Image (spheres, helix red, strand yellow):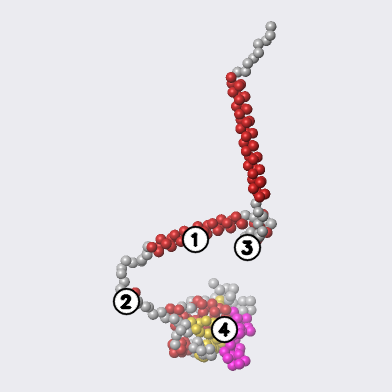
């Protein structure tokens, strides 16, 4: 007697059908991808080769750097350009909005005379010669051991030749009532050049007075006050007069006359206390 034949169940048939349909869909998808790749290759081959290389400007030089950390610079540069374009767009929009809404600090209507009112501004670099001479003469009367001689070899601007006792000489160049340049030399060094003109720029041959020249120019900038030019000039010459005891003063910090073979060449701006360059506060 023959054995009965087992018939597949319904669930087994469904799994088999699902597998066959899944395989067919995969085969169809792969065939579509293959066709699309073939079309892409055909289109790429059909592209025309550019006759001239694309101009990237200076950014093209970034690709010449073989360093790996420099490779993303070009993309960062593109992001920067994008950000700049956005800023330009936003600023244009804000300009149009602010232009249509005039902002005023006050709602009080000013009269026509008030609008046309002009305030007189004093320019201390353009003053009369008499005003400069008056200030210099008043400073001459302040100190008995310091003489100031005024000359004008280059027009209206004054050049002051200073003699401080038997210690030093200086040339102070003015622009109106503003001090522009200071050169300090030893007492035995001339203030005039070979042609008999005032020497404005030749430094001293001694290191001590070269340091004093540097400090004098620093003091010139410290005392400069365009609103109180008379006071600033008097303050500077008062500071310069404190060097009358250059070689006899002791340093306020170390208490020595010499440090590195140099006397105290610095004077504190407020108290005029002497300090060495290495000891100054």
In 3D space, how far apart are the residues under numbered discs 2 and 3 (Cα atoms)?
A: 57 Å
* Residue carrying label 3: 58
- Residue 183's tag is 4
Q: Please tell me which of labels 2 and 3 falls first in the chain.
A: 3
Instruction: Work out whether 44 lies above or below 259.
Output: above
Most foreground residue, 27 or 239: 27
Which secondary structure lies at badge 2?
Answer: helix
Residue 153: % across, % down:
53, 90
For disc 1, the marked residue is 88
Q: Check the image and report above or below for 43 versus 55.
A: above
Which picture quadrant has residue 278? Answer: bottom right
Q: Is residue 158 left or right of residue 33?
A: left
Q: Quadrant of residue 39?
A: top right
Which secondary structure class fits the magenta region best? loop
Q: Along the line of sight, which residue is nearer the eye, 153 or 19? A: 19
Of the numbered discs 2 and 4, the one sitting upstream in the chain is 2
Is residue 88 rendered to the left or right of residue 29? Answer: left
- Residue 151 shows up from this direction: yes
Packing grade of label 1 (10 A; few <14, some 14-19, many >=20) is few
Picture coordinates of residue 111, whole percent (x, y): 30, 73
- Residue at mark 2 to residue at mark 1: CA–CA distance: 40 Å
Earlier in the chain: of badge 4 and badge 3, it is: 3
The residue where tag 2 is placed is 113
Q: Residue at x 63, y 16 (%)?
A: 7
- Please provide the residue range marked out in magenta: 185-211
Question: Are the residues flagged by discs 1 and 3 in contact, CB closer than 8 Å?
Answer: no
Q: How far apart are the alpha carbons under marks 2 and 4?
A: 49 Å
Looking at the rendered image, the quarter that the C terminus falls into is bottom right
Question: Residue at coordinates 32% horizontally, 76% vertically from top-left?
Answer: 113
Residue 157 % position (x, y)? 50, 87
Q: Secondary structure at mark 1?
A: helix
């Amino acid at each position: 007697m023959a054995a009965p034949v087992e018939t597949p169940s319904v669930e087994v048939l469904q799994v088999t059908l699902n597998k066959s349909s899944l395989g067919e869909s995969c085969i169809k998808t792969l065939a579509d991808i293959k066709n699309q790749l073939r079309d892409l290759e055909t289109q790429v081959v059909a592209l025309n080769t550019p006759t001239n290389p694309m101009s990237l400007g200076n950014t093209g030089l970034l690709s010449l750097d073989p360093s790996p950390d420099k490779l993303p610079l070009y993309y960062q540069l593109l992001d920067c350009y994008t950000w700049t374009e956005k800023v330009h767009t936003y600023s244009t929009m804000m300009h149009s909005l602010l232009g249509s809404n005039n902002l005023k600090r006050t709602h009080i209507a000013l009269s026509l005379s008030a609008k046309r009112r002009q305030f007189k501004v004093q320019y201390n670099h353009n003053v009369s010669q008499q005003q400069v001479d008056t200030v210099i003469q008043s400073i001459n009367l302040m100190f008995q051991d310091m003489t100031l001689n005024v000359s004008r070899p280059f027009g209206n601007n004054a050049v002051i030749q200073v003699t401080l006792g038997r210690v030093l000489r200086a040339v102070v160049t003015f622009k109106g009532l503003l001090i522009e340049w200071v050169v300090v030399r030893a007492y035995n060094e001339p203030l005039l050049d070979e042609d008999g003109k005032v020497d404005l720029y030749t430094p001293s041959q001694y290191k001590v007075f070269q340091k004093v020249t540097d400090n004098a120019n620093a003091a010139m900038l410290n005392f400069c006050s365009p609103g109180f030019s008379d006071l600033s000039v008097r303050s500077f010459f008062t500071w310069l007069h404190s060097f009358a005891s250059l070689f006899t003063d002791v340093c306020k910090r170390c208490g020595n006359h010499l440090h590195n073979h140099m006397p105290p060449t610095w004077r504190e701006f407020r108290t005029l206390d002497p300090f060495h360059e290495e000891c100054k506060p």
